[in-house]
Image: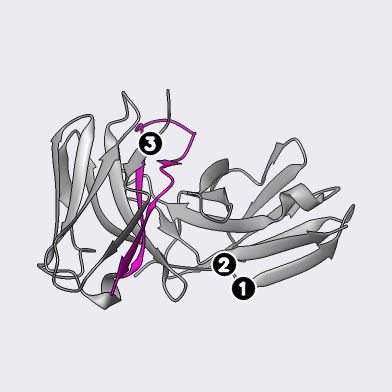
Amino acid sequence: DAGVIQSPRHEVTEMGQEVTLRCKPISGHDYLFWYRQTMMRGLELLIYFNNNVPIDDSGMPEDRFSAKMPNASFSTLKIQPSEPRDSAVYFCASSSSGTNYGYTFGSGTRLTVV
Amino acid sequence: SQKIEQNSEALNIQEGKTATLTCNYTNYSPAYLQWYRQDPGRGPVFLLLIRENEKEKRKERLKVTFDTTLKQSLFHITASQPADSATYLCAQGSNSGNTPLVFGKGTRLSVIA
């Protein structure tokens, strides 16, 4: 397995533009998580899915953020409109319930909003 | 709310020595703790999981302890090498409905040759 795949690796956009981040989890994993990492706040959970169903989106900062998981092999995180304070590294991770092997993270998307 | 703290932002040690990183939790009793390694520009990589009923877990040069009285986990790297230089994150988890992990901010370890 190629691991969790995120795209793009880097995104620079202007304030007010729509940004879409993509994630392909590991095949067979039934949990998918979106985290955001900044120096100030560390890794923060935004939303997570179980079997493609959103379970908890209380970490999503505002209505500008939305996430979908249309099938077991794909998820998106959308920010519309983007703001400079959204600049961070966004990670997608997947896991299989009932295992002792933790989460598998993607390499992240570094988002810069100017 | 759950809170997990890694007391040191950064730790410098000499090659060959044992590195010890600390993770403390408050307001919550996690069912297990996990430790991850993160290299610059990469996502965290899972290293070890230790459950609340386990005192110690080992994997090669790594050792993790879990002290429920002190509400603390210690992460040790013995015979440290420059290649061990990275940021190490601890995370707490619950058995309740697979609640997502809550991560500490990490400790940046530098092993000096």
Q: Secondary structure at mark 1?
A: loop
Give the residue displayed 58% in from the left and 68% down from the top. Answer: B6
Q: Which mark is residue B24?
A: 2
Q: Which residue is mark 1?
A: B7
- Give the mark nearest the N terminus, 2 or 1: 1
Q: Chain of mark 2?
A: B
Q: Nearer the viewer, residue A105 or B32?
A: A105
Q: Quadrant of the N terminus of chain B?
A: bottom left
In this view, the mark in front (2 or 1): 1
Whole-Å distance between the Cαs marked 3 and 1?
A: 30 Å
Q: Are marks 2 and 1 in contact (CB under 8 Å)?
A: yes
Q: Nearer the viewer, residue B29 or B49?
A: B49
Q: Chain of mark 3?
A: A
Give the residue displayed 42% in from the left and 31% down from the top. Answer: A3
Task: Tell me whether marks 2 and 3 sit on the same chain.
Answer: no
**x and y percentages locating residue A4 in the rendered image:** 38, 36
Q: Amino acid at mark 1?
A: Asn
Q: Which residue range is magenta in the image?
A: A87-114
Q: Residues within 10 Å of mark 2 (few under 14, many from 20)?
A: some
Quick check: B60 above or below B19?
above
Q: Which mark is residue A4?
A: 3
Q: Nearer the viewer, residue B106 or A24?
A: A24
Q: Secondary structure at mark 3?
A: loop
